[in-house]
Amino acid sequence: MKYALLGALILLCSNAILATEDSEKKPDDSEKEKERKFCLDSQNTLRRNYAELKQISNMRKLEYDKSMEDLKSEMEKCPDDFETTKYSDGVWATKETSDTQTAESALASKYACVIDKKCGRIGLINKQPNWNDGKKGKPGSDCSGEVDDGLCVGSSPAFSLFIVFSFIPILYL
């Protein structure tokens, strides 16, 4: 009888441990990819609509950057509806529910959505918002490369100019 009770107790404990492990499992990769795609598509739709509304000709299409998910936060305060917050070196946090914050940074090209322990769900971009970055004109008309429904895809004109001017001195050598 003692062995039967001991066996039942071990069985109950192992079931409890297995149930705890199942509840602590992280979402599988396909779920995570779906979430990333949803976040990215939502932001690019907002940027496209904002570019159309405000007639911004050089709004960049965001690409998801998984490496941003691993950055350590240096935020002193959470972003709000009106202001971004420096998240890490060269990365800015936006409130995920804000409609226009990533759109305020027309030249941003990298994006990630993360869950911050202190602030909850936030979006990360690779360029601090600056109203002066956006050029006036028909969306997509001031892109240096490919255009995807009003958003610029690929390198920015500023980067292209940097490359050109970097190599001009070499030609005179």
Image (cartoon, rainbow, N blue to C red):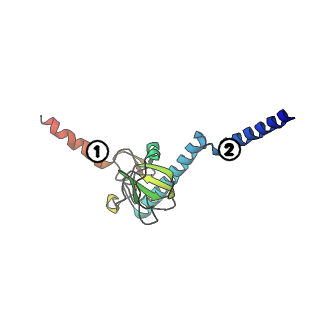
Q: In this image, 49 relative to 155: left or right?
A: right
Q: Residues within 10 Å of mark 2 (few under 14, many from 20)?
A: few
**What type is the residue that disc 1 sits on?**
Ser
Front position among marks 1 and 2: 2
Residue found farthest to the right: 1
Q: Please report the residue visible at 29 percent of the width from the left and 49 percent of the height from the top.
A: 158
Distance Cα–Cα, label 1 vs label 2: 53 Å
Residue under label 2: 20
Along the viewing direction, whichever of 89 and 104 lies nearer the viewer: 89
Helix or strand or loop: what does disc 2 sit on?
A: helix
Helix or strand or loop: what does disc 1 sit on?
A: helix
Q: Is residue 81 above or below residue 149?
A: below
Q: Please report the residue visible at 21 percent of the width from the left and 41 percent of the height from the top.
A: 166
Marks 1 and 2, the one that precedes in the sequence: 2
Q: Which mark is residue 80?
A: none
Q: Which mark is residue 160?
A: 1
